[in-house]
Image (tube, helix red, strand yellow):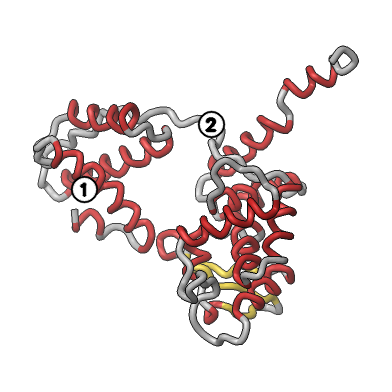
Amino acid sequence: MAAHLSRYQGESRTHTQSDLQVFLRWCAERQLDPLQVRRVDIELFLRWLQETRRFKPSTVSRRLSVVTCFYRTCVIDTVLATSPAAYVRRPSVPAESPTLGLSHLQFEAMIVAARTSTNRCDYALVAMLGLLGLRIFEACQADIADLGEEHGHRVLRVFGKGNKTIRVPLPPAVGRAIDRAVGDRTSGPILLNVRGRRMDRHAATRRLRHLAAASGVRIARMHPHMLRHTYVTTMLDAGVSLRDAQIAARHADPRTTMRYDRARKNLDRHANYILAAFMASGT
């Protein structure tokens, strides 16, 4: 397991270890030696994820991918002759993203609620997620020292997936939001929780749910990724090309961005609206 995890860095390593431990715990509960499992055992693990834990197809596919890569490393290191996960089928992942971003009006309401909040970090949190498209771990890890200038642009240095470092330009509104959160501080994290410590994803989720309630946005389960999703769909609504949206969102695969676009079109251009408008005189 250590040899396999050494191939990853940063958050990718953390998430891979977490997913792999789910499989190892499943094996331990059934007294199975992970290095002696058969293909049928992997199939049963897959069924357990789907039917017992009721995870979404994308989550099941990701965790199966982690297990498959682990056994591939075992084969490469000659720990095993063959991989028991080699011929296990992954569940099909829907082309549409299950997450729906906020509408334009809902996003504006969230921004207004964050800007008028007594918590100085609320506005910066919403701006960094919804106007910069940062992942929640990227926003929480951002420090004051990561702020700077480049070619006349104010930028934020972001440490993304795989320890990739990029510089994101800050629009004036986002810059003001960050300045408000930083205040007189000269070092430390940009985003702080209510105790004055570095904000984590759990504290961020609580703040976003509080802002959603304050702004009247009725969302069943508000979470940070919803604002990153909104970042992409709002860009597409504003006329940004799919290719430019992919680059801005830092999606390695353009199909990821297309899933966001399909999810947007499925509601805004659904045939139900056309039918209801056509029958408006009778309804």
Image coords of residue 91 (percent x, y): 38, 28
Residue 256 vertical position relative to residue 139 in the rendered view, above or below: above
Please give left or right for residue 188 compared with residue 153 in the image. left
Q: Residues within 10 Å of mark 2 (few under 14, many from 20)?
A: few
Image coords of residue 273 (percent x, y): 77, 24
Q: Residue at x 60, y 70 (%)?
A: 121
Residue at the outermost right position: 281
**Mark 1 vs mark 2: in front:** 2
Image coords of residue 195 (percent x, y): 48, 73
**Closer to the N terminus: mark 1 or mark 2?**
1
Q: Residue at x 63, y 44 (%)?
A: 101
Type of amino acid under label 1: Thr
Residue 279 vertical position relative to residue 130 in the rendered view, above or below: above
Q: Nearer the viewer, residue 134 or 48?
A: 48
Residue corresponding to mark 1: 73
Q: Residue at x 11, y 39 (%)?
A: 81
Type of amino acid under label 2: Ala
Image quadrant assignment for residue 177: bottom right
SS class, disc 1:
helix
Q: Which mark is residue 95?
A: 2
Please give left or right for residue 48 compared with residue 129 in the image. left
Q: Are marks 1 and 2 in contact (CB under 8 Å)?
A: no
Please give left or right for residue 234 compared with residue 133 in the image. right
SS class, disc 2:
loop
